[in-house]
Image: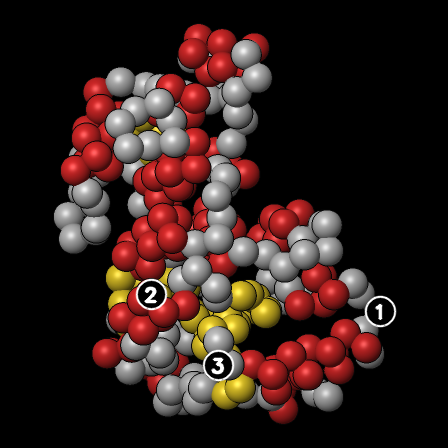
Amino acid sequence: MNSEMFERTIPFGEPELTRASAFNRYLDEVAAGSTHSGASSRISQLSPSLQADLVRFEQDGGSSETIEVIAACIRHAKRVAIQLQCGELLVPLTIFPQERLVHCPLPMTELIGRHVPSMRVLQVEPALLVPPGDEQRALIGEAHLHHPLAPLVWELAMRGPRRELLPEISGPAVYRVAPGLDLAGLPTNGAMRAAIERLRHQACNLTEIATWPALDRERASRLLNALYLQAGLMVSRSHPDAVRDSWFGGV
């Protein structure tokens, strides 16, 4: 099947939501006729650096987690369309990392409220839509379907399936919240706010953070991932506490 025959992302207007099962059949047909591996055939049109990250995520034969894919897109500053399976629906989520925006035909309240714990990445491809203000006005999606990126990645970090640190910030390290980070509008409880304020003033490793009130290793990892995806985390690998943590079997 020719990939252009499948409506993955329709730039002139809004993409219609189709059944994820139909897209999975399409991917199976593409894979059957491809000489590439399943992972590389799905991302062959992306930049080499982004491809390398996504292939690394899938090297064990599994599928990339949504948070890993978005983190890679943010790090490489690449606009992409992520085809997500959300229940029975195929939802094309377009990421604009430099503008800190997402375009999504599904209401963001529904995407975050219902699908964050179970959404599954089916394909990653270059974005066909462009962000608001671009000169190619015909390729800009409807204004009401653009949303801030921050709430989505926060919820993915705090409630998504990933329980460990993202690869970019794992390993022996200490962490500190960047000066000026504004988390207004993001859901943080008292214990979380206290941990964030503490990290504004001192650098700590994961082992120590996990001992703070209302935190354990998983919740500490989720919080650090969330802060990283807000571009608000400073990571040091040369700090003495980072080295000490590695000596005692830390991250």
Can residue 111 be seen in this snapshot? yes
Between 53 and 127, the one lying in front of the other is 53
Q: Position of residue 151 (x, y in %)?
A: 28, 57
The amino acid at mark 2 is Ile
Single out the mark in the foreground, 1 or 3: 3
- Is 224 placed left or right of 26 in the picture? left
From what the image shows, is residue 106 above or below residue 124?
Answer: below
Occupied quadrant, residue 25: bottom right
The residue depicted at 52 percent of the width and 20 percent of the height is: 250
Q: What is the secondary structure assignment of the residue under circle 3?
A: strand
Q: How crowded is the residue under tag 1: few (<14 C-alpha within 10 Å), some, or many (20+)?
A: few
Q: CA distance from mark 2 to mark 3?
A: 14 Å
The residue depicted at 63 percent of the width and 91 percent of the height is: 5
The amino acid at mark 3 is Leu
* Residue 89 numbered tag: 3
Q: CA distance from mark 1 to mark 3?
A: 28 Å
Name which of mark 1 and mark 3 comes first in the sequence. 1
Name which of mark 1 and mark 2 comes first in the sequence. 1
Name which of mark 2 and mark 3 comes first in the sequence. 3
From what the image shows, is residue 110 above or below residue 79?
Answer: below
Mark 2 — residue? 112
The amino acid at mark 1 is Thr
* Residue 35 numbered tag: 1
Q: How crowded is the residue under tag 2: few (<14 C-alpha within 10 Å), some, or many (20+)?
A: many
